[in-house]
Image (cartoon, rainbow, N blue to C red):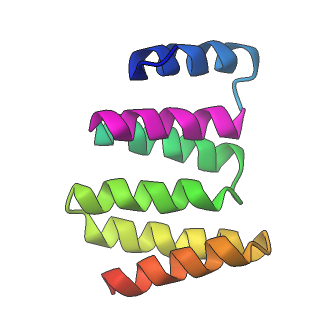
Amino acid sequence: MSTAGGRIEQLRRLLDKEPNDAFCLYGLGQEYARRGDSTSAVQWYDRAIAADPDMSYAYFHKARVLQEADDIDGAVATLRAGLEAARRANDAKATNEIAGYLDELT
């Protein structure tokens, strides 16, 4: 299925089998962000983070959505939490990308 709606339905079916699959939760955040539905995107990113607190890119993309919604304080707080997550996971690439994004906003 190539449409966003099709991808959302596919991810939801996968979640029916594994409700705490952080990758599927993150994927739903991505799909809703692509649609411009920031409220839903943030909710799905939050669920991904709850399922896997070290999923640093969920923080990164949640911060993008918050920035686009003019919630700079929320974006900065999210990036700070994401930076901690990336460091915990020893993910140098994510650490650098999140730190760079944080520098842009502060």
Q: Is residue 78 above or below residue 22?
A: below
Residue drawn at (54%, 75%) of the image:
97
Which of the image's four quarters has the C terminus? bottom left
Q: Residue 51 occupies which quadrant of the picture?
A: top right
Q: Position of residue 80 (x, y in %)?
A: 51, 76
Res. 78 visible in picture: yes
For this rendering, which residue is in front, 17 or 36? 36
Q: Position of residue 20 (x, y in %)?
A: 71, 32
Whether residue 34 appears in magenta in the rendering, the answer is yes
What range of the chain is rendered magenta? 21-36
Whether residue 49 appears in magenta in the rendering, the answer is no
Q: Residue 87 occupies which quadrant of the picture?
A: bottom right
Q: Is residue 77 above or below residue 68?
A: below
Res. 84 visible in picture: no
Q: Residue furthest left?
A: 70
Specify the principal SS of the magenta part.
Answer: helix
Q: Position of residue 66 (x, y in %)?
A: 32, 57
Drawn side of residue 44 relative to residue 42, left or right? right
Residue drawn at (47%, 83%) of the image:
100
